[in-house]
Image (tube, rainbow, N blue to C red):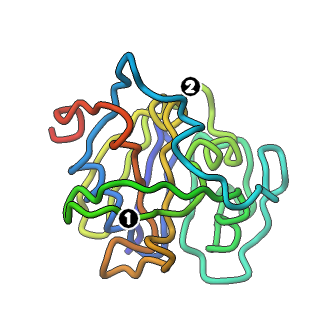
Amino acid sequence: MHNLWRCNGMQIYPIKKLLGVVMVMAGLVAMVGCATAPDPSTIYTRVSEATLKAGDSIPAPTGDTILTVTGKIGTTNSDDTIVMDLATIESAGEVTYEVTDPFEGNKVVFRGPLTSDLLDIWQVSPDATTLHVIALNDDVVDVPIAELRKYPVVFALQQDGQYMPIETRGPAMLVFPYDDFEFDKNLYNN
C-alpha cells in the first residue's frame, strides 16, 4: 500500500506513510495572511543550502525511497515519476522553524526543505492548483498549491533534532507557520 499525494493530476506516493501530514493539516488548516504578517523569509532559519535546485537532474535514490511523485511534473528520474530518498529530499536545502505544537502545546523545532522549493524542483505545472494528500491512515486533505508557494511551509523530516519515526508523525509532515500567520480553520476541516 502506498501513500498518495495528487496535485490536480500530480500524485506523490511516499513509500513510508506520512501520518503527520494529515494530523497537522487537520489541526492547523489553511493559512490566511493577516495585515501585520511578517516577511515569510524571516520566520525560519536556513541551515543548509540546496545542492539540488530547480532545473537540476534529480538523482536516483541510493537509500530507501520515501517519496514518489507523479502527475503534472516537468521532470522525472524513474520512468514517468520522481522517486526520492531522505538524502535527496534534504539536498533541496533545509530550514528550521520553531512553532508551538498544536497537539501538545509546547514549542518544537522542525527541520526540512521548504515545500515551495520541492515544488520547484519537481517542476510542478503552473496549472496545477491542489496537492491532494492521502496519509497512512487514509485520511485525505487538499492543500492549495498557491498557499504552499506563498507561505514558508516546511516539509519536515526532523522534530527537535531527531528524524520523525512513523509512530510519531514521520517520516515527514507539512508544518505551516501558524504561529506567524492567521489560519482559516474551516478550509481543511471539511
The residue identified by callout 2 is 127
Residue 123's place in the image compared with 20, above or below, is above
Image spot of residue 145 (x, y percent): 48, 34
Tell me the element at label 1: strand
Q: Nearer the viewer, residue 132 or 90?
A: 90
Image spot of residue 44 (x, y percent): 55, 48
Q: Residues within 10 Å of mark 2 (few under 14, many from 20)?
A: few
The nearer-to-camera label among 2 and 1 is 1
How far apart are labels 2 and 1 at the CA level?
A: 35 Å
Q: Nearer the viewer, residue 9 or 139?
A: 139
Q: At 30% from the left edge and 82% from the top edge, which residue is drawn?
A: 167
Q: Which quadrant, please, contains the C terminus?
A: top left
The residue identified by callout 1 is 108
Image spot of residue 50 (x, y percent): 77, 55
Q: Position of 94 compared to 66: left or right?
A: right
Q: How many marks?
A: 2
Specify the quadrant of the image occupied by residue 37. Answer: top left
Residue 54's place in the image compared with 94, above or below, is above
Q: Which quadrant, please, contains the N terminus?
A: bottom left
Q: Residues within 10 Å of mark 1 (few under 14, many from 20)?
A: some
Q: Earlier in the sequence, mark 2 or mark 1?
A: 1
Q: At 82% from the left edge and 44% from the top edge, which residue is drawn?
A: 55
Image spot of residue 92 (x, y percent): 70, 57
